Amino acid sequence: EADIYQTPRYLVIGTGKKITLECSQTMGHDKMYWYQQDPGMELHLIHYSYGVNSTEKGDLSSESTVSRIRTEHFPLTLESARPSHTSQYLCASHAGTSGIRADTQYFGPGTRLTVL
Amino acid sequence: AQSVSQHNHHVILSEAASLELGCNYSYGGTVNLFWYVQYPGQHLQLLLKYFSGDPLVKGIKGFEAEFIKSKFSFNLRKPSVQWSDTAEYFCAVNVRDNTDKLIFGTGTRLQVFP
């Protein structure tokens, strides 16, 4: 399996706090993604990146921001957390167009965020 | 806009029963199709994928899926489920644009009882 790491796995935090969800991958993949998943719902793309210094908004509007300063690192930040941000956040990377894993996304374990 | 529909939200089966989970997508162009599985407490894992060629694809753990282009469907099947198949199953589509993003269905929760 692919190596994608997310920390923390669980986070409970109060309203108004700034938080950063970490995502890193060790495979050198250029494209990376953040999805948001509410219980019983589909995953929605909120951010993606083509590579270093590239960030794009996804299909679902989100108040979060992302950065991509290094290939392996794609953190997501909420400047001021609110209860409406309570959700699960999944990070993924795309395995490129060659090799046995070509054209496939691999996912991290997710961060379950609860904002009180 | 593209979308993916999974018709079965919650399926309950006994061990050794056969399984078929429906997946339909709405997009007129060429797509890559995926089934992902999420076991309790674990991350999303690739079960199988279809890009081209033989429309019947085989994945891990005895799962298979059939792409029927005329029906825009990619149903997942397993002839005999096991208790260890208890998980959430997600169908996803990549419309082969430059983003390579995935569009997911809402998922099907499968419970298998011994």
Image (cartoon, helix red, strand yellow):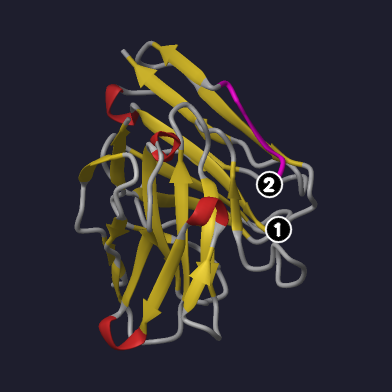
Q: CA distance from mark 1 to mark 2?
A: 7 Å
The reply to whether label 1 and label 2 mark residues of one chain is yes
Amino acid found under the numbered disc labelled 2: Arg
> For numbered disc 2, what is the local secondary structure?
loop
Which quadrant would the C terminus of chain B be assigned to in this image?
A: top left
Does the magenta segment cover residue B19? no
The residue tagged 1 is A51
Which residue sits at x=45%, y=75%?
Answer: B95
The residue tagged 2 is A68
Percent position of residue B89, x then y: 38, 48
In the image, residue A60 above or below residue B25: above
Crowdedness of circle 1 by 10 Å Cα count: few (<14), some, many (20+)? some
In contact (CB < 8 Å): disc 1 and disc 2: yes
Bounds of the magenta span?
A: A2-8
Residue nearer the viewer, A108 or A65: A108
Which residue sits at x=21%, y=43%?
Answer: B10
Task: Say if residue A57 shows up in the picture.
Answer: no
Residue nearer the viewer, A16 or B63: B63
Chain under numbered label 1:
A
Residue nearer the viewer, B67 or A45: B67
Label of residue B27 in the image? none
Compared across the picture, whether B56 is left or right of A43 comes to right
Compared across the picture, whether A97 is left or right of B91 comes to right
Percent position of residue B55, x then y: 46, 81
Chain under numbered label 2:
A
Amino acid found under the numbered disc labelled 1: Gly
Compared across the picture, whether A104 is left or right of B78 comes to right
Which quadrant would the N terminus of chain B be assigned to in this image?
A: bottom left
Q: Earlier in the sequence, mark 1 or mark 2?
A: 1
